[in-house]
Amino acid sequence: KNNDLLNQTSNQDKLLVTTRTNHLTDYAVLGKNKGFFDRLGSNRFFVISGILIMLFSGITLTYLIYKRKNKNQF
């Protein structure tokens, strides 16, 4: 009986969260079952663009450092 009460309250909490934030329904209800990469699915665009920006800036910085070190050759 005690366990049922706990389940009921946790379900009510989940419902509250889902009604308040409609676009975050996945996080509220499926948060426990979903893996890290599944949760990134909705934000895939931001994740990919972030990785691309990091790669680009890394390559640019590496090139600039290389150019400064070998300044006398250019």
Image: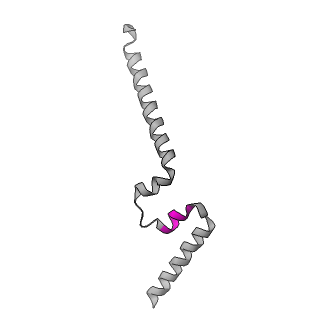
The residue positioned farthest toward the right in the image shown: 20
Residue displayed at 55% across by 65% down: 25
Give the answer, above or below, for where 8 lies relative to 64.
Answer: below
Q: Is residue 36 depicted above or below 33 in this figure?
A: above
Q: Is residue 73 left or right of residue 49?
A: left
Tell me the quarter of the image containing the N terminus: bottom left
**Tag count in the figure?**
0
Q: Picture coordinates of residue 44 (x, y %)?
A: 48, 48
Of 67 and 43, the residue lying toward us: 43
In this picture the colour scheme is one colour
Q: Quadrant of residue 73?
A: top left
Which portion, as a residue range, is magenta?
24-29
Q: Residue furthest bottom?
A: 1
Q: Residue at x 47, y 45 (%)?
A: 47
Magenta stretch, main secondary structure class:
helix
Residue sitting at x 40%, y 8%:
74
32 is within the stretch colored magenta: no
Q: Quadrant of residue 63?
A: top left
Q: Position of residue 28 (x, y in %)?
A: 52, 66
Residue 17 in percent (x, y) is at: 58, 69
> Along the line of sight, which residue is nearer the eye, 43 or 2?
43
Against 66, residue 8 (above or below) is: below
For the point 44% across and 40% down, the residue is 51
